[in-house]
Amino acid sequence: MMIALKAATPQLPRTTAVADHVVAVDETDSTNALAVQMIGDGSLTLPDHQDGELAVAVVAADRQTAGRGRNGHKWVSQPGRCSTMSYAVRIPRAIATDESVNGWLQMIAGLVTLDALNGMIEEYGAAPNQPDCSLELKWPNDVFCHGLKLGGLLSELVIPPSSGTDADADDDVVIVFGVGLNLALGACRLPTPQSTSLQLHVSGLPSFGEMRDAVAERQVEGFRERLVKFIADPKGQAESLREEVKAVCWARGRQVEAHFTDGTTLTGEAIGLNEDASLILRTQDGTDHTVRTADVGVL
């Protein structure tokens, strides 16, 4: 019989030292929803973006009662085992709404998450159980290990109260990046057969609380560093990000099936990413198709 785990307010000393604002609660419906609510009512504020500087706020909970994923999917997590965090940043509206580059914001969140996990593993001298236990990104929003889902990401655009619908392109908006990670789940607690947990693939990890804080600290610093560069040169960064993602793109070179929100599907080989971060899927007749919004699974 599985014992129900009790939620406790996350202790995040390392994250608090580097973030501009940290909100930690034992339980909420969704850290993204809480962040959006607090931004909307003015209880969570971020200074305007300045050249070379970027404020990052964190909203953390030990338990989510209504965690969300892309396309209305649920994100199931367990207290004391799964990290549920949202990171809020202000970026220029012109970049956030530019469809030629804004797809890279989600990819940046994925790369920041891989960097944070790998950096934490290295810091504590932990080691993969197998040589091929590398962490990868499943386009567009999942962290994968051995073909199984270890984490998921969800980004949302929020208009801060100081802005309005008639604001100009130079104004800032807030992007909230929700990041859910299975860090210390045992095999018997995995929510689905397609999911996994970091502790099942890596030995020598610290306690869950230490892991959560160390990863979140690195994510704050990673978002700040990568987004400052992206804001300064979106097109140039897009090209370098495209090459970086290529090395960690789990679907690349595999036969996949894209499931669209209208119920249709498309099957083919995942070739790579376009300049706007959309997926290139090559069907059997040799035609390349652009996939911008879909759930992608390997056949």
Image: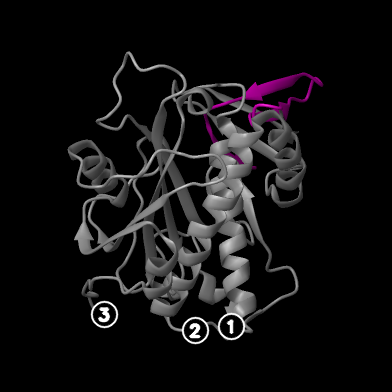
The answer to whether 31 is drawn above or below residue 12 in the figure is above
Q: Is residue 195 magenta?
A: no
- Do we see residue 127 in this rendering? yes
Amino acid type of the residue tagged 3 in the rendering: Met
Q: Is residue 284 magenta?
A: yes
The residue pinned by badge 3 equals: 1
Judge by depth and name the residue closer to the eye, 256 or 82.
82
Mark with earlier residue (2, 1)? 1
Crowd class of label 3 (few under 14; some 14 to 19; many from 20; radius 10 Å): few
x, y (%) of residue 69? 39, 44
297 vs 193, left or right, is right
Q: CA distance from mark 1 to mark 3?
A: 32 Å
Image marks 2 and 3: residues in contact by CB distance under 8 Å: no
Label 2 element class = loop
Looking at the image, which residue sits at the far front? 51
To which quarter of the image does residue 139 belong?
top right
Mark with earlier residue (2, 3)? 3
Label 3 element class = loop
The answer to whether 65 is drawn above or below residue 264 in the figure is below
Mark with earlier residue (1, 3)? 3
Judge by depth and name the residue closer to the eye, 92 or 138.
92
| Residue at the image point whose x is 41% and y is 16% from the top | 168
The residue pinned by badge 2 equals: 206
176 vs 105, left or right, is left
Number of on-image labels: 3
Q: Which mark is residue 174?
A: none
Q: CA distance from mark 2 to mark 3?
A: 26 Å
Magenta region: 275-299
Amino acid type of the residue tagged 2 in the rendering: Pro
